[in-house]
Image: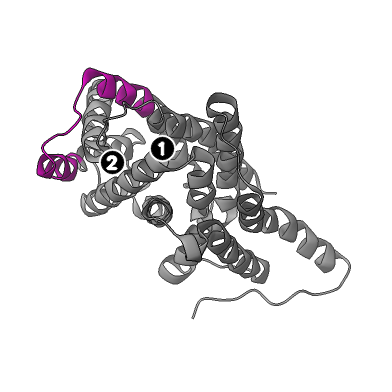
Amino acid sequence: MQRHVLLGLMLLIGGNIFSSLYDVSIKYLPDDANPATFLMTRQISAVLMLLPIWYFLKCPKPAAYGVHIARANIGVIGSLALVIGISALPIATVCAIFYSFPLFIMVFGFFFFKERVKSYQWLCGVLGFIGIMVILRPNQISWAGIAALISAISFAISQLTLKKLSINDHPIVPLLYFSLLGVPLTIVMAATQGFVGLSWEMFWVGIAGNSFLITYHGMCVIAYRQAQASDLAIAEYFGLLFVVFLGWLLFDEWLDGLTWFGAGLIILPSLILPGLFKKLKDSKIQPLDPVSPA
């Protein structure tokens, strides 16, 4: 494995530990917490945390604002959907759906960034989609489950937009502007609901969550500059393992058998098929030719 790909994988695996801690922090919100109000406090507190660092680094500016604006607001939508999902469902179930986002990274990377996707990766995508349907259970689908799926799609788009950022941007730039440019939308959403549930307890949960989330996003910014998205997507699955463990340890939550089966269809093919296809290639048995973008 090439060194830059390995570095990207290690950064994402480490980052997913912090992402899992952010998911767990949402469970500590007050019972009367409103998702939009929490998201507003989280965005504002993130800006306040990052501004001193940005100022210390002599206030670096982005090369262009367009991608930062789009990425920030897509991130707000995905974050709101995730908070709604985690507030209503066991954290492990929500994250089993959410961690389908590497599949969407692969598909969107193929269609919009012309990234090369191999035949076994397409097979992983098909099995992963089946896994999503198993977890969602269309005959008993809920709004919380749909929210988790929306968060996965939004997050995949947000991650892929990292490829469009200028490589000359300092890493603090996407971190700060991801929070800053999303503040207006969160204020509008919270205002339409009368800033319900605003409290110091919510604010401190936001501070704790931001500490984890900023660390995760910082590691993602560096990781996705190392290699193409489809090569790194597998590392994101480790976050599901961390979340399931923390959900069991802290909240006595566990996945039922059908959800485990669906999660297995999402994760296991990406862990097993690359090695299997490599063995077939090494043994002179040629797998299907990689699919090329149209």
Q: Seen in the image, is 73 located left or right of residue 117?
A: left
Please say which color scheme the image uses.
Answer: one colour
Give the answer, above or below, for where 15 lies relative to 283.
above
| Residue 292 picture location, percent across and down | 56, 76
Disc on res. 217: 1
| Residue 173 picture location, percent across and down | 29, 37
Disc on res. 114: none
Q: Seen in the image, is 194 located left or right of residue 246?
A: left
Please tell me in which quadrant of the rendered image residue 14 appears.
top right
Q: Nearer the viewer, residue 188 or 178?
A: 188
Image point (51%, 76%), residue name: 293
Counting residues from the N terminus, which is met first, the one under dot 1 or under dot 2? 2
- Was residue 188 drawn as part of the magenta stretch in this picture? yes
Disc on res. 178: 2
Element on which disc 2 rests: helix
The answer to whether the residue labelled 1 contacts the one labelled 2, judged by CB atoms less than 8 Å apart, is yes
Image point (52%, 61%), residue name: 137
